[in-house]
Image: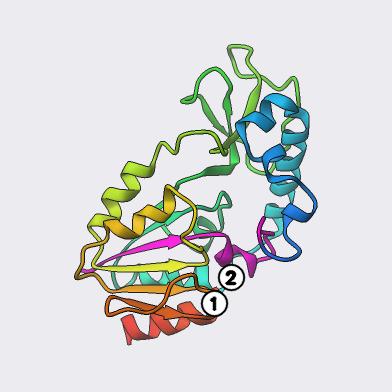
């Protein structure tokens, strides 16, 4: 059975109504990304950061997986599928995908500010200043912010190195360390790059599909499954 590895970014969830930071109309027009998505921002104004992620969590509760998410779940009927996502939403899981690695954390979880391994699933509930872990330390979003290490990047690299097919959806592949995963794919592995504004061009190994996630994924699904 083939092993299909999928790298996803904000573009795959945009069709589900999840705002991105960088696109027109995205969250950067309302927030300074470093105020709400960096460790410095957390130390500067934790209440603002908590409020920001509370709003994101509330939005996520009403969002639904789109066709691209559902097609990836359906691929599991034909191959082993490993998803590595830069997204912090749970739309892949809700679509039915069974193997999802979240590089940048998960919106529906929180952790202790004193213990990175004390992680709790809170669903879509808000967290506020004064909400603490059992040891009495403030809870924070279980998110990898700018200025923090990406603990799962080595796991992601290992998964990518075993790919028979690599699909990249909705990410510019310009932000490191996630962008470096592309280089872990074996030279013989075909790569499909789906993005309406692709930052790379087609090569012998890479097929660029300059479309939205759903329509682009349908084309890849049809080619792989027949």
- The residue at 68%/24% (across/down) is 43
The vertical placement of 67 against 181, above or below, is: below
Question: Of callouts 1 and 2, which one flags the residue occurring earlier in the amino acid sequence?
Answer: 2
Horizontal side of 184 relative to 197 (left or right) equals left
**Which quadrant is the N terminus positioned in?**
bottom left
Mark 1–mark 2 Cα distance, whole angstroms, equals 7 Å
Q: Is residue 52 magenta?
A: no
Secondary structure found at label 2: loop
Q: Which residue is mark 2?
A: 66
Q: Which residues are magenta?
A: 1-22
Closer to us: 168 or 67: 168
Q: Position of residue 175 (x, y in %)?
A: 49, 53
Q: Is residue 21 magenta?
A: yes
Q: Tell me whether the residue at label 1 lies in contact with that at label 2, contact meaning CB atoms closer than 8 angstroms.
A: yes
Q: Position of residue 222 (x, y in %)?
A: 38, 85
Q: Position of residue 150 (x, y in %)?
A: 44, 39
- The residue at 74%/45% (across/down) is 32
**Which quadrant is the C terminus positioned in?**
bottom left
Q: Which residue is mark 1?
A: 214
- The residue at 22%/58% (across/down) is 162
Closer to us: 30 or 96: 30
Q: In which quadrant of the rendered view does residue 111 lie?
A: top right
Secondary structure found at label 1: helix
């Amino acid at each position: 059975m083939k092993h299909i590895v999928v790298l996803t970014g904000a573009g795959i969830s945009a069709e589900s109504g999840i705002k991105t930071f960088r696109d027109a109309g995205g969250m950067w027009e309302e927030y300074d990304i470093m105020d709400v998505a960096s460790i410095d921002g957390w130390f500067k104004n934790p209440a603002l950061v908590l409020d920001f992620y509370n709003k994101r969590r509330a939005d996520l509760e009403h969002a639904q997986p789109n066709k691209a998410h559902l097609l990836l779940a359906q691929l599991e009927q034909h191959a082993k599928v490993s998803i590595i996502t830069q997204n912090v939403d749970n739309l892949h899981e809700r679509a039915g995908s069974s193997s999802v690695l979240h590089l940048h954390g998960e919106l529906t979880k929180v952790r202790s500010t004193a213990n990175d391994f004390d992680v709790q699933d809170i669903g879509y509930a808000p967290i506020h200043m004064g909400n603490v872990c059992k040891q009495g330390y403030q809870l924070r979003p279980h998110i990898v912010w700018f200025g923090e290490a990406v603990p799962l990047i080595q796991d992601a690299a290992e998964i990518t190195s075993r790919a028979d097919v690599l699909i990249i959806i909705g990410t510019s592949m310009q932000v490191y360390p996630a962008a470096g995963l592309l280089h872990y794919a074996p030279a013989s592995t075909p790569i499909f790059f789906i993005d309406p504004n692709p930052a790379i061009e087609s090569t012998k190994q890479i097929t660029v599909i300059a479309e939205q996630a759903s329509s682009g994924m349908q084309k890849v699904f049809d080619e792989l499954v027949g």
